[in-house]
Amino acid sequence: MNKLFLVTAATVGSLMFGAPAHADGPNDAQIAAIVVTANQVDINAGELAKSKTKNEEVKAFAQRMVTDHTGVNKSAVDLVTKLKVKPEQNDTSRSLAAGGADTIKKLQGLSGKAFDKAYVDNEVTYHQTVLDALDNTLIPNAKNDELKALLVKVRPAFVAHLDHAKHIQGSLGQ
């Protein structure tokens, strides 16, 4: 199968396995950096998709990603500012940023239906990976009750994004 896989192994690995749910997991400042970076990666991909796609369904989905992930980032930044927590860059947040940059570079080289398919396939994989990270690493390791509550509160949006991306993926054909 000639499927372009855009989410890098390093990105998936760092989100899923970089910080197990135990005492050595990420602290709240690191979780804040991971959350902001993960959202920014999807905002960047959505902005690119809005500018490249001719497919109205893909364009609407990309706009939703930009809007929703910008909102999550605002909530996260507002919360860490209130708590006086400075997001702490870490291996996971740096890997996410690098993986996001790699994805943008690969997507920029595509157009038309190939772009749409690669973008949506990436969104399916990315949202599943983020959900796994929320469930297995970020929520279990969050110590501050307000941070944990924010992560729990935004989780359904990631589920909705995944379901929406899968729906579009099916309409684009495999």
Image (cartoon, rainbow, N blue to C red):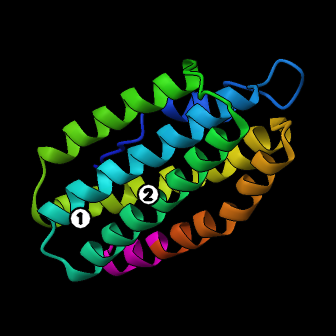
Residue 117 percent location from the top left of the image: 28, 63
Check disc 1 and report the residue beneath it.
116
Residue 105 percent location from the top left of the image: 20, 37
Q: Residue at x 89, y 26 (%)?
A: 22
Look at the image and tell me whether residue 55 can be seen.
yes
Q: Secondary structure at mark 2?
A: helix
Q: Secondary structure at mark 1?
A: helix
Please say if 68 is above or below 109: below
Look at label 1 and name its amino acid: Asp
Q: Residue at x 54, y 35 (%)?
A: 12
**Is 134 positioned to the left or the right of 129 in the image?**
right
Q: Pointer 1 and pointer 2: residues touching (CB < 8 Å)? A: no
Which residue is at the front of the view, 113 or 1?
113
Check disc 2 and report the residue beneath it.
70
Asked if residue 169 is among those painted magenta in the image, a careful observer would answer yes
* Bounds of the magenta segment: 165-174
| Mark earlier in primary sequence (1, 2) | 2
Residue 11 percent location from the top left of the image: 49, 32
**Is 86 positioned to the left or the right of 96 in the image?**
right
Please say if 133 is above or below 8: below
Mark 1 or 2: in front is 2
**Is 84 positioned to the left or the right of 173 in the image?**
right
Locate the C terminus and report the quarter of the image it occupies. bottom left
**Is 112 positioned to the left or the right of 103 in the image?**
left
Look at the image and tell me whether residue 10 can be seen.
no
Which residue is at the front of the view, 147 or 169?
147
Which residue is at the front of the view, 138 or 73?
73
Q: Main secondary structure of the magenta part?
A: helix
**In which quadrant of the rendered view does residue 109 lie?**
top left
Residue 163 percent location from the top left of the image: 55, 73
Near mark 1 (Cα within 10 A), the count class, few <14, some 14-19 or many ≥20, is: many
